[in-house]
Amino acid sequence: MRYFENTLRLRIDPKEKYKAHQLIDTLMQERLQIKLPYSWRSVPYPGAEHYSAVQIRSSVATGLPGEKELSISFKSGDIVQFTCNLCSVIRVRVNEDKKQHERIGSSEQVVAKLKKHAARFGLEVLSCVEESDEPFNIKKPKNAVILLGQRELSVVARILDVSLAEKTLIEGIGNKRIFGFGYIWGLEVL
């Protein structure tokens, strides 16, 4: 499978996920006319306060400077190791009569959620270790604030479905991927 990666420097704080989402979405879908799914993550730019390094992965070339074309080959049963940043929001039912509410889950709840939904992503999670936990707010226009959390996880998994695993590498894993969650990096086939 071929895919493309690029790293951009944006003049935006890495914690401003909503602003980064707007900029990346405008760039990819409106300026570059790329309507296919992609994944991205924002990290602090080394040595530059209030700047972000945004890593983008897509199945088609963007044509942006510095883009790298990469390839990887999976087989069913392969064991892979990677790091990902999952959204740590889980849905809970307050009581039997009420609808579900979202809140930041514990480490065990987030890992259990990943293991439960891994088959949708073509994977069986064999082990998962939390590397870091970072709660933050997404500030939307008109003062709307969404409380989210991010857990960086080191995962070892078995590939169950090659096509789903390839799709997951491009699109990311988990929910809230549009805000930069679920990006997979440091992928190795063991």
Image (cartoon, helix red, strand yellow):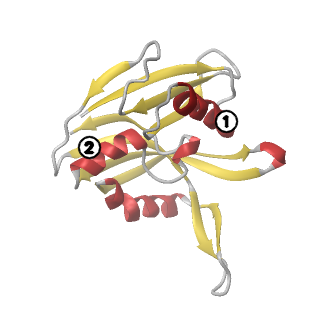
**Image quadrant in which the C terminus is located:** top left
Secondary structure beneath label 1: loop
- Under mark 1, the amino acid is Lys
Figure check: 189 above or below 98: above
Residue 83: x, y in percent?
A: 41, 40
Name the residue carrying label 2: 80
The numbered mark, 2 or 1, whose residue comes first in the sequence reads 1
Q: Residues within 10 Å of mark 1 (few under 14, many from 20)?
A: some
109 and 7: which is toward the camera: 7
Q: How far apart are marks 2 and 1 (CA)?
A: 29 Å
Figure check: 92 above or below 121: below
**Image quadrant in which the N terminus is located:** top left
Name the residue carrying label 1: 15
Residue at screen point 43% across, 13% down: 66
Residue at screen point 40% across, 32% down: 58
Figure check: 179 above or below 29: below
Residue 9, quarter of picture: top right
Residue at screen point 46% across, 12% down: 65
Figure check: 37 above or below 31: below
Residue 147: x, y in percent?
A: 70, 53
Residue at screen point 50% across, 59% down: 110
Residue 40: x, y in percent?
A: 50, 35
68 and 150: which is toward the camera: 68
Q: In this view, does 106 lie to the left or right of 111?
A: right
- Under mark 2, the amino acid is Val
